[in-house]
Image (cartoon, grey):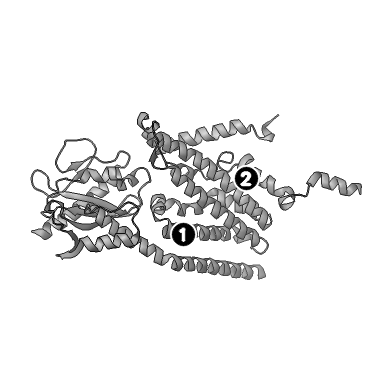
């Protein structure tokens, strides 16, 4: 019986020590992780709005550019990020979108022109898709396909299509081969975001 | 006197841990390479090797975890109750893996985003558990550290080789940068980035490794 008590005691002590080490590590890295997440979010808003940022900009620099250019506005129930420079063609309005991906949640920002008819830019700041396949959604080569995309189909119904092959349409882009599931899910969450902002506008 | 001499001739007490260190190092990294000979831990070797950078970070993660968990398991080997030794090993391994994950998230944010869930999956990597169970439980701490380094390097080097060729053939780039001349001339073959490419690359690397190393002593007859 002595063995059992010792075993329980050993397990309890080991578990407690491990938990304490991890708690310490988590609280030690928390400020860094929070700063990373904040800078990442700001950077994605800037990228979606097509505001040029220097390559390898520091977190402080990003926050500064963000403050100088972006206004946060509430539009009905949607929080929007508005960029209105003197050159009217460059103006844009961004909103967050989110939804389930293949392995984990996907979050990003969708920027539209001020008239809410075309996509200006799109970014993803949180995703756990398969590296090399679904993970390619974060690459500029995929995201740039969305620039200038109409957000309504020919009948005027809001929505876009991400699909390989099929008929060419003003609201359709090619997907990523090998990542059909990810593309379907991204399409769904983008359409939800588009519908919500179109309804808010009316 | 004669007794002493014969003892010295067989065990050669010099260098690290009375000569055992070097043997352990060779054994782990070469003769008993965890990936190429024992074919352990191939799940992660297949998953993260589509880019060289990912492979290198993953290799570093495994060296860190293997060394850390081997050291702690070895230090505790005399007081760990036999019945719960495996659960204790997993708890220790998981602690080190999460430490590394937290470190990546705090200081190498971009890399952490790319590797996604695979860092956490080191907990289930057969190599780490295998070394703790097969080596650290029976050997003193310093020797266990050497064993951890040896196996970690054995894994990391093979991963880097596979990552190098998969990225080179799959994208025509290395470390995300284009190579002059080669990148313009070469048409990337996407299969090398996809799962089948991983199997092909791993199979070829294991084959070449075994051809160079030659058959194991017990197979020579």
- Relative to B80, B118 lies left or right: left
| Residue A26 position within the rendered picture, expressed as x and y whole percent measured from the top left | 45, 66
Q: Residue at x 10, y 48 (%)?
A: A157
Q: Residue at x 82, y 44 (%)?
A: B9
Q: Secondary structure at mark 1?
A: helix
| Front one among A157 and A24 | A24
| Front one among B171 and B127 | B171
Q: Residue furthest right?
A: B1
| Residue A73 position within the rendered picture, expressed as x and y whole percent measured from the top left | 17, 65
**Residue B1 position (above or below residue B210):** below
| Label 1 in the same subunit as label 2 | yes
- Relative to A57, B162 lies left or right: right
The residue indicated by pointer 1 is: B103
Q: Quadrant of residue A71?
A: bottom left
Q: Residue at x 57, y 34 (%)?
A: B209
| Front one among A97 and B79 | A97
| Residue B7 in sight from this viewpoint | yes
The residue indicated by pointer 2 is: B28
Front disc: 1 or 2: 1
Q: Chain of mark 1?
A: B
| Residue A100 position within the rendered picture, expressed as x and y whole percent measured from the top left | 29, 54
| Residue A77 in sight from this viewpoint | no
Q: Quadrant of residue A166?
A: top left
State how far apart marks 1 and 2 are (Cα): 27 Å
**Residue B122 position (above or below residue A21):** above
- Relative to B64, B147 lies left or right: right
């Amino acid at each position: 019986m002595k063995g059992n008590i010792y075993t329980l005691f050993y397990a309890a002590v080991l578990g407690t020590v491990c938990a304490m080490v991890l708690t310490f590590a988590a609280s030690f890295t928390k400020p860094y992780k929070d700063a990373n997440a904040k800078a990442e979010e700001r950077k994605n808003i800037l990228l979606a709005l097509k505001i040029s940022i220097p390559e390898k900009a520091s977190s402080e620099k990003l926050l500064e550019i963000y403050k100088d250019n972006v206004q946060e506005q509430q539009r009905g129930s949607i929080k929007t990020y508005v960029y209105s420079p003197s050159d009217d063609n460059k103006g844009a309005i961004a909103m967050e979108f989110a939804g389930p991906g293949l392995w984990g949640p996907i979050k990003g920002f969708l920027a539209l022109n001020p008239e809410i008819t075309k996509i200006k830019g799109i970014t993803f700041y949180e995703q756990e898709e398969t590296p090399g396949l679904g993970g390619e959604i974060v690459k500029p080569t995929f995201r740039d396909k969305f620039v200038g995309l109409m957000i309504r189909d020919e009948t005027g119904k809001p929505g876009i299509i991400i699909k390989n092959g099929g008929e060419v349409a003003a609201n359709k882009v090619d997907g990523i081969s090998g990542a059909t599931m990810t593309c379907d899910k991204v399409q769904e969450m983008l359409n939800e975001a588009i519908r919500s902002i179109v309804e808010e506008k009316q | 006197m004669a007794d002493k001499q014969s003892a010295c001739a067989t065990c050669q007490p010099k260098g690290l841990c009375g000569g055992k260190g070097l043997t352990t190092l060779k054994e782990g990294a070469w003769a008993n390479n965890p990936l190429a000979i024992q074919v352990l831990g191939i799940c992660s070797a297949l998953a993260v090797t589509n880019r060289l950078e990912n492979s290198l970070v993953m290799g570093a993660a495994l060296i860190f975890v293997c060394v850390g968990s081997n050291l702690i398991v070895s230090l505790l080997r005399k007081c760990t109750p036999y019945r719960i030794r495996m659960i204790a090993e997993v708890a220790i391994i998981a602690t080190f893996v999460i430490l590394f994950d937290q470190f990546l998230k705090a200081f190498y944010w971009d890399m952490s985003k790319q590797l996604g869930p695979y860092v956490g999956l080191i907990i289930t990597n057969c190599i780490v558990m295998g070394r703790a169970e097969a080596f650290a439980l029976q050997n003193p701490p310093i020797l266990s550290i050497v064993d951890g380094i040896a196996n970690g390097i054995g894994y990391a080097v093979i991963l880097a080789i596979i990552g190098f060729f998969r990225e080179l053939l799959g994208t025509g780039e290395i470390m995300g940068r284009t190579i002059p001349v080669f990148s313009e001339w070469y048409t990337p073959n996407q299969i090398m980035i996809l799962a089948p490419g991983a199997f092909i690359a791993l199979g070829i690397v294991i084959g070449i490794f075994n051809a160079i190393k030659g058959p194991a002593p017990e197979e020579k007859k």
